[in-house]
Image (cartoon, rainbow, N blue to C red):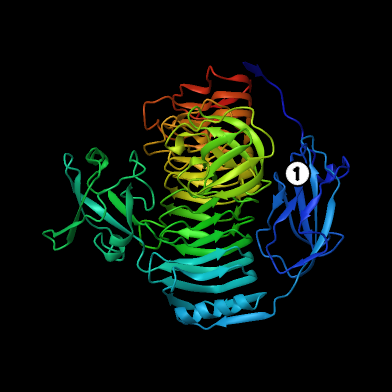
Amino acid sequence: MVSLLAFSGCKKIPLEEAVQHERGSTVVLKSPENQSQSFSTMPSFVWDEASDAERYEIEIALDSDFKELIDRDEIVIAHYVADAELPRGKLFWRVRTIYENGLFGAFSEGSFTINEIVNIYEIPDGANTSQIELAIAEAAKGTPSIVRFAPDGKYRVAPSNYDLIRLSHVENMIIDGQGAELVFIEPATGLSSLIDCRNILIKDLTVRFDPLPYSIGIVQSVNMETGKFSMVMESSDIPTFDDAIMMKHWTWGVLLDSTIPGKLQDDSPLVVSTRERQVEVSENQAGLAVYTLQLKSPHVAKYFRLGSKYIVFARSKGRGLVRVEGGSDIAFLNIINFGASAGHYTSFESSGLKVLHCKSLIPDGEWFGGNADGLHVRSNDLGPWVEGCKFEGLGDDAVAIYSKGIFLLQQDSPTELRLDTKLFNLKPGHSIRIYNPRDGVVVVDQVTIATIVPQEPGDGGLNQAHFLVTLDQPLKQRLFTGESDPLLNDQIFNRSLVNRNFAVRNNFFKRIRRFGTVVRALSGVIENNVYTEISNIPIVLRNEPDLWRNGLNSEGIHILNNTISDSGFVNGSEGKGQINVVMYKMGHTLANGRDHADIIVSGNTIHNWQEYGISIQNARGVQVTDNLLSSDADGFDNSRKHFGIYINNSEGVLVSGNRFDDSRPLDAEIEVGDNTENVIIETELFLTH
């Protein structure tokens, strides 16, 4: 059902007026606990959600009267991180609700103390790898502690065991770079690995790789029949295609724009694979080395142009910049890196990751940045806080937040399931959701784990080790476990470790391969970011049941006041929005269900968009309001359908106050598919140049 209405929204009461109209309700502060003490200058502020609140106001001060404010902000989730270190000493904080009608709730107040750290470990300028690793190891034994590099120091390092900073079960430690530069002479190594650590801060460092972990060539010739193509090197400062580094870590590649560093070539595939480590080397008439590679799929040669640039990533078995496993409250502040073999900031089954004012950049004079994701977060408890960062020229998503499906091997009874050990992260008390990937529907919304018992091969008639999981209540239906490939069986998702209350705000994402921000989470905000020249989709809520089994659905997500431009220009962007909400089933086809819920898309500016501006599918309870879709281009880059806003297989959708400033011929400003219910479209404003 579609209704057409026209009315104005509610008036917002100014702050000075709203203060005098309190509703009296308060929130419960959770962390930092009242009158607690810690050593962390970047704590996570957490409070209980108020279901009727539109957003929250938080203040942090030096005094209990809140006259000496350190920070004040408004946020739509029950989680906050200040974007700079807090001073040591006793601090005060308070939170209140703000309601849709402009009224405020009463403040809830608390205090906490950040203690001084007296154990300091200095690393002299020019220290070698072993000296650095020894100082960090000693500091880890003497926590709380601070490790200080020399101010603006210079270091060339080759980690003895993959990562330079290796900490396990360490608490209350700061690595202070003080502006130092680390040059890694082994490009497949990383800066840090933190296993089950708490309250760790790494800050003020610049990381470079010499050599960089990729090869880039300029295409000289292409054989359309055989798929062979020849190149000369794009730069003399990067490894050649036959270099030992490339032979050891070779993966796939992509085609790059010939004039714009970091940008994928228009209309090119997301992945261009060659026969691994097969490189023919010859010499041209100018005496330059020529490198000839063979495409795995010769038909891909049609995308090659003379002068195109082709990159192969040295990513296989390479290390990311930083890796966090388990633990909580790990922070990275003012880290600048140029290149990385794998992901940049990764976090698995952790909680409260913070990445603030960090930059992953293209090295001066080069054509690409890092090989993989800027932020890669899987199954965190409290979701990550990413603010004030700049990611450009990356070989995978700028921000990827998700959980993994767990294979269901067998159902013994309504309360007993046998689950695969791979990626198993369940504990008693965790809740799970069960997804049918064949039809794309949730079959069990939520049930709680009672017990978990490890099983040996042969137990339960299975020939592999696994877990026997008992549920706290019987399932009402029989789950599907009939396929020998467990990917096709019903999939289990942990709904306790679901990246709750994440924030991606005030960042700049430029020339990213694939997605700008891809999310699968419960409760979070994506706001005030800039996305430009993202190859596929700048902002997307989606699952990936095929191959990766990344998921699942998202609920309570706010997509607010982002600026998006000139994106969605490679193969794979067809029929998708620049802000894209969708669910899939096996075979990369649209899911049957409507499992995304409570999504707000408001105040965004989308410029020079292709395909659809905003696309909402497989969702319920969605607001699409006050967005601007504009263009100064002469036309679209294809002859497919073009809709400003597209709604399909959804229910309870409000479309209101959106503006269109686009002279290109649209098939429809707002298109609503037949498979929809309760879609309300208020009068929209259409502008022309």
User: Looking at the picture, which amino acid does disc 1 mark?
Assistant: Glu
Residue at image coords 52%, 65%:
193
Quarter containing the N terminus: top right
* Extreme-left residue of the structure: 285
Tell me which corner region of the image, top left, top right, bottom left or bottom right, holds residue 102.
top right
Relative to 673, residue 418 above or below = below
Going 27% across and 58% down the picture, which residue do you hit?
Answer: 234
Residue 231 in picture, x, y percent from top left: 21, 54
- Could one spot residue 597 in this view of the protein? no
Residue in front for this viewpoint, 500 or 631? 500
| Residue that label 1 marks | 49
Is label 1 in a helix, a strand or a loop?
A: loop
Q: Residue at x 57, y 50 (%)?
A: 454
Please name whichever residue, 643 or 406, is drawn nearer the observer in this view of the structure: 406
Q: Is residue 600 above or below residue 278?
A: above
Tell me residue 452's x, y (percent): 62, 47
